[in-house]
Amino acid sequence: MKYIENMQQVAALEPDYLGFIFYEKSKRNFEGIIPDLPEGIKKVGVFVNEIPEILVSIVEEYQLDAIQLHGDESVEYINSIRAKLEFSRTSFIEQNKGRKKVKKPKSYQNLEIIKVFGIKDEFNFEILKPYVNVVDYFLFDTKGKERGGNGVKFDWSVLEKYPLDIPFFLSGGIGLDDVEQIQIVTKANLPIYALDVNSKFETEPGKKKIQELKQFKEVIISSEKK
């Protein structure tokens, strides 16, 4: 998301998550104000190999509920993010001890961490195993020229070999034309947690088509009830 009015329009459709890209090389790079969102919508910050201290400051500034890591972030990197967030909160509380009007900062112990991996025609799922105890979700996107938002699908049949129980987001060029394929893949006993949609529902980078998103959500929900 990039534009306030558009954010509010999309939020009215009650998605589970809204994403904000904090990556200067992205056409969707976000700089600005996030309006108050309805309760239940989680704010996701999308980062690519960001300096840990900068990432932590953005999480705190925007009160993010989740982070999506689109770069080459290691297990050690993720552990350092969690530690820095907790240290920052503890330090603030200690520095303001005894000051009655100072509100305690938000705890990020439940910050959701989503680690992204790109797939094209094949994928070595062994590389996921070190992340099992440090992330909440994986996200599988299409490996392409850009770090996400390429608008192209990968071969979803690759996911049939997914060996883990950790839920994942399905991403990569998903549009209205993919509903039938989505119905098939979601019935394959895979732990698909969410569908991540982006470029196929845009009039320009960061600006979403409201009616098409609404239609997509309605079709997906009705297909799940069948």
Image (cartoon, rainbow, N blue to C red):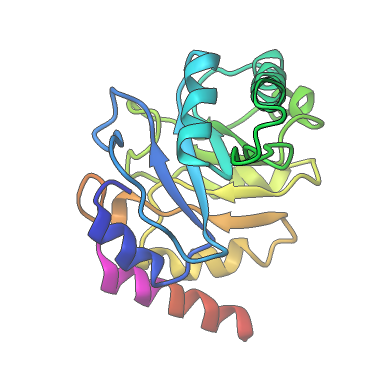
Tell me if 174 is positioned left or right of 126 in this view. Answer: left
Q: Is residue 158 above or below residue 70?
A: below
Residue 105: image x %, image y %?
A: 62, 37
**Magenta span dominant secondary structure:** helix
Please give the count of numbered marks on the rendered protein. 0
Q: Is 213 covered by the magenta stretch?
A: yes
Residue nearest the observer in this picture, 40 or 35: 35
Q: Which residues are magenta?
A: 208-216
Residue 111: image quadrant is top right
Q: Which residue lies at the image location 26% right of the left edge and 60% below the top edge?
A: 6
From the viewer's perspective, tell me whether residue 205 is left or right of residue 7.
left
Q: Is residue 18 left or right of residue 128?
A: left
Q: Position of residue 152 (x, y in %)?
A: 36, 44
The answer to if 132 sits in the magenta stretch is no
In the rendered image of this protein, does residue 35 appear above or below residue 47? below
The x, y position of residue 221, in whole percent, is 54, 78
Instruction: From the top left corner, tell me how far across and down residue 204 is, in percent.
Output: 17, 49
User: Residue, x 71% and y 41% (percent of image)?
Assistant: 136
24 above or below 34?
Answer: above
